[in-house]
């Protein structure tokens, strides 16, 4: 159970895991794109204009320090839209976890492999070759 100080046993990635990671990564990227499109669509269908939504969102994020002069109606529309966006995000997150599980990866292991690829040039090269090979 002892782990070396450089964390090497967490970063050891088998070829099978790397293949699973590549498939899962593609699924996760597609799901993120869908989530972004659904969020954009929700904002587009809202009575709030996108620019106004962004102004109110910015004001709320900064602790109300920016004065967006929000009306009660805008506040209700904003809260409704944020609820819808949160539902989209939760659904998307569940689908991402499911995509990882289908490849026998936990979220933690997926993140460990991603980190290992970033830190290990050999693994990075192996991953690139795997990706370019799967495209043909």
Image: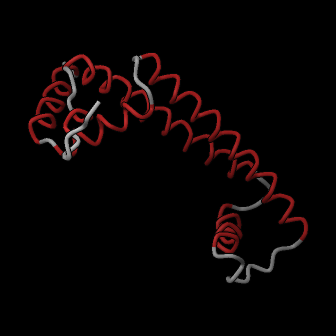
Question: Residue extending furthest right?
Answer: 72
Q: Position of residue 20 (x, y in %)?
A: 32, 20
Q: Where, by quadrant of the figure, is residue 102 drawn?
A: top left
Q: Position of residue 101 (x, y in %)?
A: 47, 20
Q: Where, by quadrant of the figure, is residue 19 drawn?
A: top left
Question: Along the line of sight, which residue is nearer the eye, 66 or 50?
Answer: 66
**Point 22% across, 45% down: residue:** 118
Q: Is residue 122 above or below residue 52?
A: above
Question: Along the line of sight, which residue is nearer the eye, 127 or 10?
Answer: 10
**Point 78% across, 59% down: residue:** 78
Relative to 113, is 29 on the left or the right?
right
Q: Position of residue 71 (x, y in %)?
A: 87, 73
The quadrant of the picture occupied by the N terminus is: top left
Relative to 38, is 47 on the left or the right?
right
Q: Position of residue 66 (x, y in %)?
A: 68, 82
Visual colour scheme: secondary structure
Question: Along the line of sight, which residue is nearer the eye, 54 or 116?
Answer: 116
**Point 62% across, 41% down: residue:** 89
The quadrant of the picture occupied by the C terminus is: top left
Figure label count: 0
**Point 68% across, 52% down: residue:** 43
Relative to 8, is 43 on the left or the right?
right
Q: Is residue 36 above or below residue 1?
A: below
Question: Residue extending furthest front?
Answer: 2
């Amino acid at each position: 159970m002892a782990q070396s100080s450089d964390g090497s046993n967490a970063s050891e990635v088998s070829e099978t895991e790397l293949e699973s990671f590549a498939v899962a990564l593609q699924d996760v990227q597609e799901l993120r794109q869908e989530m972004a499109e659904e969020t954009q669509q929700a904002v587009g269908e809202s009575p709030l204009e996108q620019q106004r939504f962004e102004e109110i969102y910015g004001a709320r994020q900064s602790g109300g320090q920016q004065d967006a002069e929000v009306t009660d109606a805008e506040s209700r529309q904003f809260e409704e839209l944020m609820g819808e966006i949160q539902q989209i995000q939760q659904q998307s997150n569940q689908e991402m976890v499911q995509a990882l599980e289908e490849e026998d990866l936990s979220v933690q292991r997926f993140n460990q492999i991603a980190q290992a690829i970033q830190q290990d040039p050999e693994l990075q090269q192996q991953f690139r070759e795997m990706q370019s090979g799967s495209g043909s």
